[in-house]
Image (tube, helix red, strand yellow):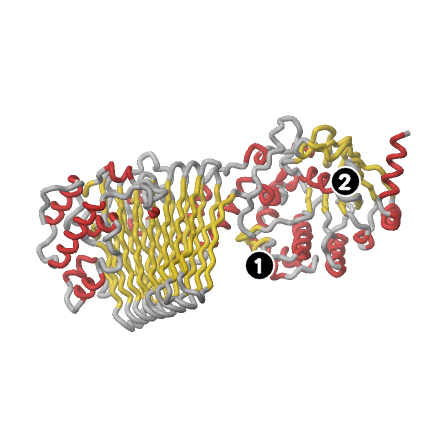
Amino acid sequence: MSPILEIQDLHVSVEEQEILSGVNLSVNAGEVHAIMGPNGSGKSTLASTLAGRPEYQVTAGYAHYRGKDLLEMAPEERAREGLFLAFQYPLELPGVRAWQFLKAAADAGRQHRGEEEYSARDFDRMLREKVKLVDIDPELVRRSVNEGFSGGEKKRNEILQMAILEPTLALLDETDSGLDIDALRIVSDGVNRLRRADNAIVLVTHYQRLLNYITPDRVHVLLDGRIVRSGGPELALELEAQGYDWIKEAVEAGESL
Amino acid sequence: MTQTYTNHPAYHADYLALAEQLTPDRPDWLRELRAAAWERFDTLGFPTARRGNERWKYTNVRPIAQAEFGLGAADGNGRPDLPAGLDVKPSFPDFPAPWLNLVFVDGCPLAGPNTGDGAVSTLADALAAGNGIAESVRANLGRHAAFDDDPFVALNTAFLNDGACVRLPDDSPEPVFLNIAYLRQSAATVAYPRTLIVAGRNTRLTVFESYLDANALVDGGNGAGVSDAAPRYFTNAVTEIALAEGAQVSHYRLLDESRNAFHVGTTRVTQARDSSYTSGSFARGMALGRHDLSVLLDGTGAFCSLNGLYLTDDTQHMDNLVSIDHAKPHGISRLYYKGILDGRSKAVFGGTVLVREDAQKTDAQQTDKNLILSDRAEVDSKPSLLIYADDVKCGHGATAGHIDADTLFYMRSRGLDPETASRILIHAFASEIIDSVAQPEVRDYLDALFLDTVSSKTLPNLGESGAASGNKSGTGSGSKNPGSGRRLGGD
């Protein structure tokens, strides 16, 4: 079976400046991958590029999603095809009712798959279940999307959206940052409940602590726009203990050879 | 009163003709009022944006002055027929009982649908009525809307003929709901609708006052799709509202004139002690629109809440001039206007809150926010505070911004196409004002009307990158951020 995500030699520039310089990555169904790296290494750029952020320009390489050319697709097409990005900084949508927004998003995917739109009643029922699943305050879905939410509430709302859209590939961009331990546990539990044999999750994170709650199958270290090390969960622990400097040094030494 | 010389011969001829036609039972004081108003207009002339004329700085009315709109056939005391095919009932706001209706075409009342009673009638009927009603009209007509410094009010008063009159006696127990529709029919003409509302002590009144193009109603499309045929005409409307002690008035005003129309409207409100005035001023684009709303808080503890929503497109121009005069202590005022601008349209917002020396403990807030959908649209927003009391709480602010590119990407990343996402954002922006309408039937009507406009809008200018299909390399246009850094709302 072909991987859910296959990235080869991906180069990405933002405003003429190259951020990713040849990323290779392959993610199979049923797997959780963690992409770690210091600030500015290109982690968020990778996630945003995969989601189709317009100002991120791919200058070389490819990214295939379930065998299709991902980079050809508009952001909304990617979403409808089952790709989901949990934003590092979720946007506030003043005046846009969460209920309306979530239903529009869910219906866009259903229509794309040739399914009927949700009836209001069915959507309500489904929403109630998901709210329970990710342990979010039900009051939040009665308000405008993210408006006046705390950082933790916004992150949890992202996980709620993920639960509703049931993505095949979920990209979580620093979803752990800014969360206290309780919120971290709630978010992690939500993610763990959404793990399935037929989907995949890519966690982008600066810190190892998220991986105490979500055990990854593979850990990758992104440095200066390239994946320089890949390994099992033990790699994350190594990074936690020693920081990123030793990898930097090793890479520099390796490259100078 | 015949003048040997006039600066405005066409208007003067119409003025004299109207005086001939008016029935002789019109009171002398009204004739004198009209004569004084004519003289004042003739002296003032149409306003210009000359230096120092702040009230007209951003709005050029030369097209109105040059067109020399004349009175149409429906002047005098004629009862006009509705345009063929116009079914009044479903075509304009048809609110269920207990709403009363007053419908005018080109300034003259329609006999059919009017359901006025003693408290609600045409102005002409009120002037002819006994029981002190005519005296009450005399005591208020022209008192709240002074024409000394205002040529359009002067012109309206000079041509004062008919309109709507509401006179709620003190302590009337039942709330009154009134729908006043001023339809326009004839191209190349002017109408001078006049509304007088006197809300007695502790009375409650809700008024929906609309200015509509009857021709568009015939097509049944809320003006959509008839732009080529949309008539050019001029409406010069004046509304005077007096609130006695403890009166509560909700006043919704809809401007939905022909796309080629000119409209200059003036609303003057005087509030006594502990009265409450809530206004919603809604405008969809016309060639040139202006609403000059001025509220005088002339009693202790008066409250006013003024909301507005304006949509402009093409080369339309909409000017909202809003003034709140806190003359007495403990007054509260809230001013919140929002605009959505597209095409090469232009909007003007001039808000002035004056807090006089006596008006201690005043609490005043004014805000104007604009959503700009096109690079070529322009807004001149000037909120200002003039404070002469020292113990007050006042604030003001104005913003203008595009649809934020990051926000749009966020919505697209959830599967919404850019058009749907933009429509949701535009509607959310507008609905904050529409939701402030208390009456559900009015709110639903406005929501449908404005949502309809929003839905028919083309995709706002997102730059090439926003609408591009993906982030594949090559064109070089993809790096442009269409949001240009200005974020709207939520801040």
- Tell me, yes or no, whether the two marked residues, 1 and 2, touch with CB atoms within 8 Å: no
Percent of width and height locating residue B246: 34, 70
- Label drawn at residue B485: none
Chain that bears disc 1: A
Percent of width and height locating residue B220: 34, 44
**Alpha carbon of mark 1 to alpha carbon of mark 2: how far?**
38 Å
- Classify residue A204 as left or right of residue A56: right
Q: Is residue A103 among the parts visible in the rendering?
A: yes
> What residue is disc 2 on?
A41
Figure disc tally? 2
- Classify residue A5 as left or right of residue A121: right
Counting residues from the start of the chain, the first of labels 1 and 2 encountered is 2
Percent of width and height locating residue B376: 45, 36
Have a look at marks 1 and 2 and say if they share a chain: yes
Q: Quadrant of residue A153?
A: bottom right
Residue neighbourhood size for the residue with mark 2, other residues' Cα within 10 Å, grouped as few (<14), some (14–19), many (≥20) = some
- Classify residue B416 as left or right of residue B233: right
Q: Is residue B441 among the parts visible in the rendering?
A: no
Which residue occupies 45% across, 45% down? Answer: B340
User: Is residue B85 shown above or below B304?
Assistant: above
**Tag 2's secondary structure?**
loop
Percent of width and height locating residue B258: 32, 42
Nearer the observer, A121 or B291: B291
User: Is residue B147 shown above or below B58?
Assistant: below
Which residue occupies 74% across, 39% down? Answer: A42
- Label drawn at residue A142: 1
Chain that bears disc 2: A
The residue mark sitting in front, 1 or 2, is 2
Q: Quadrant of residue B314?
A: top left
**Tag 1's secondary structure?**
helix
Q: Callout 1, which amino acid?
A: Arg
